[in-house]
Amino acid sequence: MAVKILHMADIHLDCAFTGSGFPPELTRKLRSNLKSTLAKIFEMARQEQVDIITICGDLYESERISADTFRFLKDEFLKLSPVKIFIAPGNHDPFTPSSIYAGLEKANLSNVHIFKEPRFVPVEISEGIYLWGFAHPSPDYRGEPLKEFKINYPAARLQGIPSGKLVLQQELPERVGFCNSDPERSEGEESQSEILRDAQDDCGVFDRKINNEGCNILLFHGSDTRAVPDGKAVHAPFTYDEVVQAGASIALTGHYHKMRCDLKNKPLLIYPGSPEPLGFDESGEHFAVVVKVEKNGESSAAPVKTNIINFSTEEIDITGISSSADGAQKIKDAAGKYGRTDIVRVILKGRIDPEISIDTGTLSDNLKGEILYLAVLDKTEPAFDYGSIAEEINVRGVFVKKIFTEMESAGEKRKEVLEQALKLGLEAFEKKEIILP
Ligand SMILES: [Mn+2]
């Protein structure tokens, strides 16, 4: 019997959007939007009639999460019942005794399973289909989750169960049994004891049931070392070879915020990405992924779009603008194709008259109601009239004349340096902040 999973990660509830430069009312709106998106994903899961939801880390930001968000999560999880939720904590939401996750454990929600340990622990989600979850124990966990890991239970010493030892009840994988269970039968305890009975009858049962020939799904937050995105901190690094070596049928991961779902390579390795973009470096559409896995390990996946907000960047060259109003109109035109769910960043380039300065604050106000937010990044350079400056009888004039004389005899490379010196020197005379290239 196949299991249908909705896989998501990295929603970062209560994200601070630090360093974005956004006003507080916008970051508040974005935070509330993250909650709406999570609720929307859960609604989608119900409509798609998935059997389980997997959340692969960074569900929230532990240093900021509020009591209100805790209650929100609890309510949303409860509403999902009988759909089960499996959570593998990541670097922003590690499992610690004081974490929100520990609080959720205490709340004893029957349809929520949180992996708590920094090692792969299996749960049987349907007959013969096992989900192996891993938890980050701290924000700065630096281990390698898949190093020397092999799916071979209970023989694998890495599972903490010495080979040949009779499996104790607490060490048994939990049989969640919602896909194939009789609705009359109470879940949990009874099925646990059923497994234990099996185990006592035949203590080799797990060698037979959980090995790399069955269907084994890995669920963990980490960095695929093949392609670490620019500027992304490496947490829990692993290689694709390790996924293969482990004997996994499929790896459901989290951490990278851009969706990656390469359907050509088996086993599948899926990063759903952040369901909502968290900044200008996360432009484009964002997703959760619906995954189907068969008992024989066969799997397929299809992304579903989740984002409400879009982040976009427009670069415009405003060389030759005649006035600040002229520049403002060009910015307005560039932002004009966007709508009310767009956060647009316009990067200004080119050389403009040093006298012209564009009032971006007023511009943002004018665009209110048309787009969600406008950010303007001014990377223009002042256009100086070198000829007339060289005629000036002052230090500035002498500076320009000297550089011009040097340029006459300079080679190609030297000329480039002198051009830079000329530009930066004149900006210094304007008392502008000098940023050396
Ligand atoms: Mn993340």
Image (tube, rainbow, N blue to C red):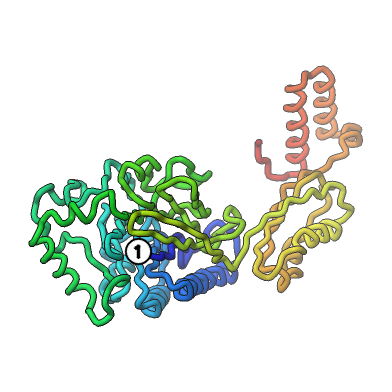
Q: Which residue is mark 1?
A: 87
Position of residue 176 measured from the top left corner of the image (x, y, whole percent): 26, 69
* Quadrant in which residue 104 is drawn: bottom left
Q: Quadrant of residue 68?
A: bottom left
Residue under the point 35% across and 43% down: 244
* x and y, in percent, of residue 211 in the image: 24, 50
Q: Secondary structure at mark 1?
A: strand
Q: How many marks?
A: 1
The one nearer the camera, 318 or 386, is: 318
Q: Is 188 placed left or right of 251 in the picture? A: left
Q: Quadrant of the N terminus?
A: bottom left
- Asked if residue 170 is positioned above or below residue 151 in the image, the reply reads below
- Residue at image position (46%, 40%) is 226
- Residue 81, image x, y percentages: 36, 78
Which of the 4 image quadrants contains residue 57? bottom left
Residue located at (85% from left, 27% from top): 401
